[in-house]
Image: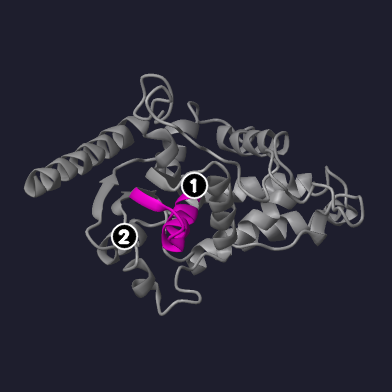
Amino acid sequence: GLFGNNALFNPNEHFIVCANILGSNYGTTNPLSENPITGQPYYLSFPEFTIRDLASAHNLLANHLGIDTIKVLIGGSLGGQQALEWSLSKTQTIENLILVATNAVHSPWGIAFNESQRLAISADRTFYANQPTGGLKGLKVARSIALLSYRTYQAYNDTQLESVNDKTTGYRAASYQNYQGEKLCKRFNAYSYWYLSKAMDSHNVGRGRKSIAAALDEVKANTLVIGIENDVLFPIVEQQYLAKNINGAQFSSINCAYGHDGFLIETDKLTNIIGTFLKESVNKKIIKLDRTA
């Protein structure tokens, strides 16, 4: 991975902050948290929030920790959307910004995938029962839909192809979809999933600003944008757009059969690309210092 002992970002060398996001059930306030007014979990009365709100929450944490300069801000997918919004808030000095498999505005294609997942969740009548396990059957289906956007035709052929020709049921691909859905249901809840998907839909750096391009022009950090060549959910044209419109941004791509999930799988390739970028960033600083000496 990118983080850990002997990894690119070693906690013995860097002060690493990886905070859970608002709405998620991994520790931050979320739909299953207690509403102080009612004394009961929020469930569907939880207020909707945007990617910009998530970035604001991170900013509050940074202020609490006394952080005014961030050496490297990195995020992929939903995390990349937050990193981009945070860089535009200009609340902290961000020296290096690394955006992986993300975009400036969530596409109609991405929104359609998210809405399809929410349709699956809402088709489960227990979702409206206001209970912690509400909507889990729908969440299982939503996860199955999401996987199709995270992976590719080639990825399924490489990992789920049958070894015999006489099967008429019990396919590996079918078993895999069920397994992944059940796995998510053991660690997540349908309400958080619902709200976070809506937050992703809201992502648009042009909202409340002159335009998307004008907003990107305001990014001051030394920026690296990385795309996945076979990404179905966040096509590489979206990362190319970011790199084109962020001043001085570098662009790099990874060829990976896994599609969007490649940013979670191809850690060796990411390490090489990011490591080179950060070394060049340090060298630029040294050159600038030499020129002013």
**Label 1, residues with CA under 10 Å away: few <14, some 14-19, many ≥20:** some
Q: Is residue 29 left or right of residue 108?
A: right
Q: CA distance from mark 1 to mark 2?
A: 31 Å
Going from N to C along the chain, the mark reached first, 1 or 2, is 1
**Furthest residue in direction bottom, as rendered:** 210
> Vertically, is 245 above or below 79?
below
- The front one of 84 and 264 is 84
- Tell which residue pokes out farthest to the top in this image: 6
Left or right of 185 in this view: 44: right
Are the two marked residues, 1 and 2, in contact with CB atoms closer than 8 angstroms?
no
Going by the numbered disc 1, the residue's amino acid type is: Tyr
Residue 216 location, x and y as percent?
35, 67
Residue at position x 88%, y 47% in the image: 131
Q: Judging from the image, what secondary structure is the residue with disc 2 in?
A: loop
Q: What residue is pinned by disc 2?
A: 220
The residue at the point 49 percent across, 49 percent down is: 79
Magenta run includes residue 103:
no
- Image quadrant occupied by the N terminus: top left
Residue 75 location, x and y as percent?
44, 46
Disc sitting over residue 150 in the figure: 1
The residue segment tinted magenta is: 79-95
* In this view, the mark in front (1 or 2): 2
How far across and down, in percent of the image, does residue 282 sit?
21, 39
As drawn, the residue found furthest toward the front would be: 293
Q: Is residue 155 above or below residue 223?
A: above
- Foreground residue among 192 and 57: 57
